[in-house]
């Protein structure tokens, strides 16, 4: 899911960061999840290891909340989903919402995933 800055499809976020094309701001965020199984939470979601992952443990919708301490512009959001490894837990729809607090979130982008 990207904004109209035309990041090439399939671009490697780590390579784009090394070249200065993008800047990783995940360390500035405060993440929370709607639910998770023990050992499959925010730390595993953000650890840069493709072998670890977040696994929800509750009813839908499953939510990942990303908050920043101060107003922050996010131009590109990279999400890695591996349907072949775990099709039963891979999302079919991803929605991005923004706002000043949880109660005024507005959807800015929605994407149906086709595997």
Image: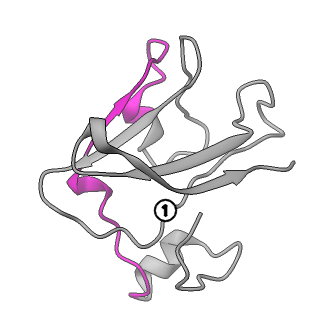
Coloring scheme used:
one colour
* Closer to us: 95 or 86: 95
Membership of 28 in magenta stretch = yes
Q: What range is drawn magenta here?
A: 20-44
Q: Position of residue 99 (x, y in %)?
A: 30, 51
Q: Is residue 85 left or right of residue 17?
A: right
Which residue occupies 52% across, 74% down? 3
Residue 81 lies, with reference to residue 53, above or below; the image says below
Q: Residues within 10 Å of mark 1 (few under 14, many from 20)?
A: few
Marker count (numbered):
1
Residue 76 vertical position relative to residue 60 in the rendered view, above or below: below
List x then y, in percent, for residue 106.
Answer: 41, 50
The picture places residue 84, in percent across and down from the top left corner, at: 84, 39
Q: Nearest the camera: 10 or 110?
A: 110
Q: Secondary structure at mark 1?
A: loop
Q: Which residue is mark 1?
A: 77
Q: State the residue at coordinates (59%, 82%).
A: 7
From what the image shows, is residue 35 above or below residue 95?
above
């Amino acid at each position: 899911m990207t904004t109209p800055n035309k990041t090439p499809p399939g671009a490697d976020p780590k390579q784009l960061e090394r070249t200065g094309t993008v800047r990783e701001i995940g360390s500035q965020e405060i993440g929370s999840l709607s639910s998770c199984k023990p050992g499959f939470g925010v730390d595993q979601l953000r650890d840069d290891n493709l072998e670890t992952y977040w696994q929800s443990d509750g009813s839908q919708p499953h939510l990942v909340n990303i908050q920043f301490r101060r107003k922050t512009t996010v131009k590109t959001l990279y999400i890695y989903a591996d349907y072949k490894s775990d099709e039963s837990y891979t999302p079919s729809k991803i929605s991005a919402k923004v706002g000043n607090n949880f109660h005024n979130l507005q959807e800015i982008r929605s994407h149906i995933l086709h595997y």
